Amino acid sequence: MKLVAQRLDVVEPSPTLAITAKANQLKASGLDVVGFGAGEPDFDTPNHIKDAAKKAMDQGKTKYTPVSGTVSLKEAIIQKFKTDNGLTYEKNQIIVGTGGKQVLYNFFMATLNAGDEVIIPAPYWVSYADIVRLAEGVPVIVPTDISTGFKISPAQLEKAITPKTKVFIFNSPSNPTGAAYTRSDVEGLVKVLEPKEIITVSDDIYEKILYDGLEFVNPAMISATMKEKTFVINGVSKAYSMTGWRIGYAAGNAEIIKNMDTMQGQSTSNASSISQAAAEAALTGDQNPVLEMKAAFDNRRKLIVSLLNQIPGINCRMPEGAFYAFPYLTGVYALPGFQKLLKEKNEKSLSKLFCDVLLDKYNVAAVPGVAFGDDNALRLSYALGEKDIEKGVSRIKQMVEDLSK
């Protein structure tokens, strides 16, 4: 008898979480490890948000809430969509979950039937494809690369659509590349999507981390027709440095929301009542901490890209948003030392081999690009201090120098 369910044969453990755990383990053993792996801000949660959580506890708000979220948090989310995005929703079109990942998982479980296709531009967040597979859907991966700014074109999208297509995933700014779509870019995709019976999932989790004055735009904001066919997912984890609080939310079709509520009610029930109070304070309170964190990320962005591009064999595009660099290593892969490693190691993925050696020999944790659907690169989170960035990149430079010998 097989003890483990067959559905798990199609998924892998999260590589980002695994690499972060290994880096933390090495740090605990006394090693000086620079961790570029974790996709979370290194800042503390702003005080007014923590104060709201303490107040909620003092007021006895420690009981079950409605499965889909408290009324007051839903009202704050509705106001956020109206103020930031010009989008209007009713309470029955909003759901709150234990992080954006749970909301996304529940969406796919509530919408996909076996064989339904989901178009996913690559590089993509590591969990998209695996969640689709768990819901018995079929990921249709559409590759992009550094030459196209890591953005899918309308022609690529049109070509990927088949009679089985049910969902298109749109993520801007992107994890892992930091690429962000302009209004013109989004309008081009909308022209393809508007006439089709396809649900667009817009993952807006990095919405507030955009640089150089770039305007945030998602497909729902382009037209009323697209709003009706777009399911918007967001959360407080990244913008407000609240990764551990585990609050994500979504807005969209009321029937889908109702069925997600059913899914959630039979799995986790409501998200933490304390975290919901904190999330409400995040959305309605002082937004200056968000701007301060973004300013720090901007400085780090410029620093890490500049340092990486000084290393022969590495090509790093300047990201427009989020807090990730996605440097291409194609020049490094051609080096004699790397070719020698390929012959010695039984590893098919070039980026995984690079990252394994980088951690084991140079004490730097990074996530291989193959985890995001692009083996040419690695993902470096610059959500850490500038001194650590400088130290970590200097070690990457040392590794590349050693491989060139």
Image (cartoon, rainbow, N blue to C red):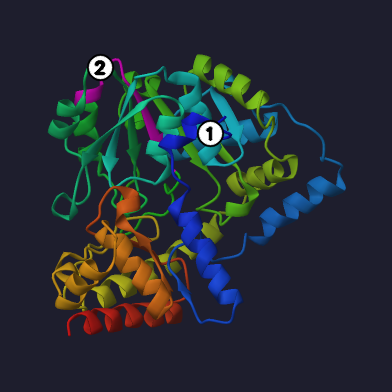
Label 1: state its secondary structure.
helix
Instruction: Say what secondary structure mark 2 lies in.
Output: loop
Q: Residue at position x 48%, y 30% from top?
A: 6
Q: Which residues are magenta?
A: 191-204
- Residue at which label 1 appears: 103
Disc number lying in front (1 or 2): 1
- Is residue 86 inside the magenta stretch? no
Dividing the picture into quarters, in which one does residue 4 lie? top right
Side (left or right) of 350 relative to 74:
left
From the top left corner, tell me how far across and down residue 334 is, in percent: 13, 70
Label 2: few (<14), some (14–19) or many (≥20) C-alpha neighbours in 10 Å: few
Residue 88 in view in this figure: no
- 156 versus 291 height, above or below: above
Q: Residue at x 44, y 36 (%)?
A: 9
Residue at mark 1 to residue at mark 2: CA–CA distance: 24 Å
Residue plotted at (58% across, 45% down): 283
In the picture shown, does residue 154 fall above or below 210?
Answer: above
Residue 27 lies, in percent from the top left, at 56, 75
Question: Which residue is the site of mark 2?
Answer: 196
Residue 4 numbered tag: none
The image quadrant that residue 113 belongs to is top left
- Picture coordinates of residue 388, whole percent (x, y): 45, 79
Q: Is residue 65 above or below residue 354?
A: above
Q: Which amino acid, mark 2? A: Lys
> Which of these two is toward me, 173 or 389?
389
